[in-house]
Structure formats: structure tokens, C-alpha cells
Amino acid sequence: MRAAPLLLLAAAVGCTDLPAGLARFDGTFSYMASDGIGRPAFGGTLRLIVKQDSSVEGTHDMVGYRFGGSGRTLVGHISGDSIFLWLDPNPDGGILIHAAAAIGGGFMGTWSSNTIAGPIPGGGIFAQRTNERLPSAP
């Protein structure tokens, strides 16, 4: 009879934790993005808060050519091992990121620039779990 309260406690504690598939995207990441031919474009920090329903919210800092700012908002969602982020969500702007989980706890993929006419391809992006920023792009 003693096991029942312990199981109930374990189940209650487990409900607050994210599943491993979601938890791998939760936290602080440093990232670097390149343009279409591999030159550094921008970089910074992503602070991602993943929710049980697979939605993502948070803030980001960005430094680089044509982009910049700190403490800006982001939204997104997770589907399987992929993450979709919209930095500075705005119908006429922002950066769209589509990436997949990478070995070592980060993620990598592509980014595009959102415009009123639709997304414009950007290049590649790599993010690593860290509390330290990567060097900023020139």
C-alpha cells in the first residue's frame, strides 16, 4: 500500500517536466547565421521557453548586417525533431527559422527574411546550447 502514494507523487512531479523531444529545445542558445553563400550574416542569443503543447515563445538578441536589437520577441513551435521560429513576428517582417535538432544539444537549418511579398531565402543557421554568446557577425 505504501507504493501507491509514491507512484502518485512521481506522476505529479513528472507532469511538470517537458518530454525529451521538447526539452532539447528549451533554454538559452547562441547562434550564428550565414548568407546564401556561407558568409556570416548575423548572430546572437535565443532564449526559448517551450510549453507542453509544443509552442515556443521567448526573446532574442541579434547583431549583424541589416539586423540588430536585443530583448525582442520570438514565437514558434516544435514538430518532431524540428523547430520553427519567427523572430520579431510581424506580417511584414522578421526572420523565419526552420531547423532540426543537432548532435550536441543544438539545432541547425535555414533562415529566411519575411517580407510583405513573402519569405526571401537567407542562408544557413546553427545554434548551440550555451549561456555565452558566439562572436557577433561583422
Image: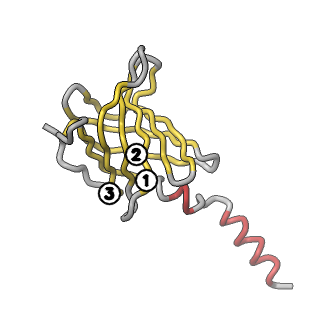
Q: Which mark is residue 45?
A: none
Question: To which residue does mark 3 refer?
Answer: 130
The residue nearer to you, when weighing 26 against 111, is: 111
Question: To which residue does mark 2 refer?
Answer: 47
Callout 3, which amino acid?
Answer: Thr
Task: Point out residue 118 in the picture as x, y percentages from the top left corner.
Answer: 43, 20
Q: Quadrant of the C terminus?
A: top left
Callout 1, which amino acid?
Answer: Gly
Judge from the rendering whether residue 75 lies leftward or rightward of residue 19; answer left or right. Answer: left
Q: Quadrant of residue 47?
A: top left
Disc 1: CA contacts within 10 A as few (<14), some (14-19) or many (>=20): some
How far is the residue under mark 3 from the one under mark 1?
8 Å
Disc 2: CA contacts within 10 A as few (<14), some (14-19) or many (>=20): many
The residue nearer to you, when weighing 61 against 127, is: 127
Tell which residue pokes out farthest to the left in this image.
138
Q: Quadrant of the N terminus?
A: bottom right
Task: Point out residue 93 in the picture as x, y percentages from the top left corner.
Answer: 39, 21
Task: Point out residue 41 in the picture as x, y percentages from the top left corner.
Answer: 21, 36
Precedes in sequence: disc 3 or disc 1: 1
Callout 2, which amino acid?
Answer: Arg
Question: To which residue does mark 1 refer?
Answer: 27
